[in-house]
Amino acid sequence: MSRPQERVGQPLFLLARALTQHISRGPVDRVTGKALYTLSEDWLLWQAPDFAPLRLKALFSAGSDGEVSEPLEAVALTCDTAEQAKEKVLSAFETKFGFPYSRPQMSVSIELERDGGFVALEEVDGSSEAIGDVTRLNTLEHYKVADGAAIKVTSRSNPSVSPQCSLKENGDIWDKYFHLIGPDVDQDLEKNPERKKLKLKEVHLTKLLSTKVAVHSFVENLFRSVWGQANRRAPQAVKYFFDFLDRQAEEMKISDPDVLHIWKTNSLPLRFWVNILKNPQFVFDMAKSPHLDGCLSVAAQAFMDSFSLSDTQLGKHAPTNKLLYAKDVPKYKEEVKEYFRSIRDQPPVSRSEFYKFLDEESKKHENEFNEAAALKELQKMILRYVPQISEKLEQSGAPAHFREELQRLQETSDVVRSCSWSCNPRGL
C-alpha cells in the first residue's frame, strides 16, 4: 500500500483542477478576473449576466493545404470573450490528448464558420460597442455564435498587432475596456458602500456556498491525505521529527500539551503544507491565475484553522472565508488532534532507520535532479550579487583564488550575453 506522503499529490492536483473547471463554468470578467463561481469574496462577480453554454466543434489545422482535423467538442459560454473561448478550446485539446496544443495561445486565433467561409473572432474590432471612452469586449453572443457552431483554430500571422493579444499587457485596460462589469458599477458602489456590504455578506454568500459545496469533497480529500486517517502511519520523517520535539519539551520540562501542539503545527502544517496548498504550480506543470490563488487561499485558511487551538467567535462581521467552513473546522480540529496522538503512539524510528529511509528516498529520485539547471540557477544568483560577495570575500580574508574565480565567472557571463548566438559554456 502506498504511503500517506505519496497520496497527497493527486488530491492537490484534483482540487486545483476542480476549482479551475468550476470557475470556468460560469461568467468570468475578462478585465477584472471576477467570477460568479468562487470561494473568495474578493473575486466574486456579484452582478452576473444571463448566460448559456455553447457546444463548439473545434477544428485544428492539420496541414499546409488548409486541411483540418476531426471536430473536437469544447464548451464555452455565450458571455465568454473571443480570448476566453479560445482558451477553453485549447484546454479541451489538452484534456483530450494529454498534452498542450503545439502553439501557445497568443500565437493562434479562432475563426467562426459562417456562410461557407470563416470569420475571425477578436475581443476588439470594428464592430465593438463603445460607451463613451470605454469599449466593451466582444463576446460569443456579440458574434451570434450558435450552439454546435464550428470554430477553426489557425496560426496568427502577426500576433504583435492583435488587440486581444496585447490587451492584458495594456496598463490602461481598466480605463479603456470592460467586459461584464459596466463602467458605471464602481462609481455606484462608491456612493453606496453599505449596498456592496449587504450584497456580499447577505445576498451573495449563497453563491460562495454553492462553490464550496461543489468542491468540498476535493478539499476534504486533500486535508485528510495530509493528516491521515485511522490505521495509517505517518511518514518516518514526520515521526522522527515530532519525537525530536517531544524530547526537547521533556528536556526543557515543558508539560503543557498546547505548547507541543503549537510547535508541531508551526513546523509542518503551516511552514510546509500551507505553502504547497497555496502554490500547486511549485509541484505541477500548471498555471495559477490570481483568481485560483484567491480560492486556494480560502481553502488554506480553513486548513490553518483546523490546527488552531483557539475558538473563533463568528458574528455578522466575520470574513466570509471563515463563515464558509465554520461548521467543518471543529470536526477537522478533532481529526488533527487524533493525528498528533496517533503519531505519538507509533513505534519510535531509530536514527539508523531514519538514515536508511532518507537513503532510499534519495535513490528513488536520483535521476530526477537536473544538475545543469541547478548550477545555472546558482550562477544567476551569484552574478546578481557579485559586488557584495566580492566585498565579503575581501573582508573575511578569503584566499585570492576565490575572488579570481568570481571575476572569471562574471567575465564569462558578460561574453555570453554579448554573443549573438546561444552559448552554453561548460564549467560555469
Image: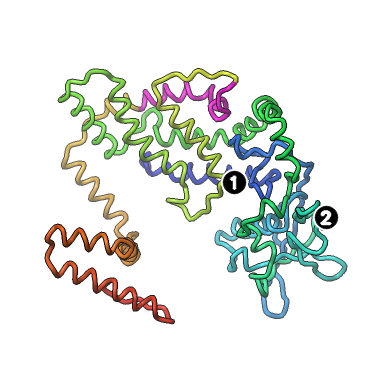
Identity of the residue drawn at 27% across and 40% down: 237
Locate residue 70, reporting x and y percent.
71, 66
Q: Secondary structure at mark 1?
A: helix
Q: Amino acid at mark 2?
A: Ala
Report the number of discs.
2
- Residue 114: tell me if it is visible: yes
**Is 24 inside the magenta-drawn segment?**
no
Q: Amino acid at mark 1?
A: Thr
Q: State the residue in front, 76 or 196.
A: 196
Q: Which residue is mark 2?
A: 146
Q: Splitting the image into 4 quarters, where does residue 135 fall?
A: bottom right
Locate residue 323, reporting x and y percent.
56, 25
Locate residue 199, reporting x and y percent.
69, 29
Identity of the residue drawn at 63% across and 30% down: 209
Q: Badge 1: few (under 14), some or many (20 or more) residues near its Cα, within 10 Å? A: some
Q: State the residue in front, 415 or 88.
A: 415
Q: Disc 1 and disc 2: Cα gap in Å?
A: 25 Å
| As drawn, 344 above or below 45 | above
Q: Which residue is mark 1?
A: 20
Q: Examine the residues drawn in magenta and state their main secondary structure.
A: helix
Colour treatment of the image: rainbow
Q: Badge 2: few (under 14), some or many (20 or more) residues near its Cα, within 10 Å? A: some
Identity of the residue drawn at 27% across and 53% down: 362
For marks 1 and 2, the one nearer the N-term is 1
* Residue range corresponding to the magenta coloring: 317-339
Quadrant where the image shows the N terminus = top left
Quadrant where the image shows the C terminus = bottom left
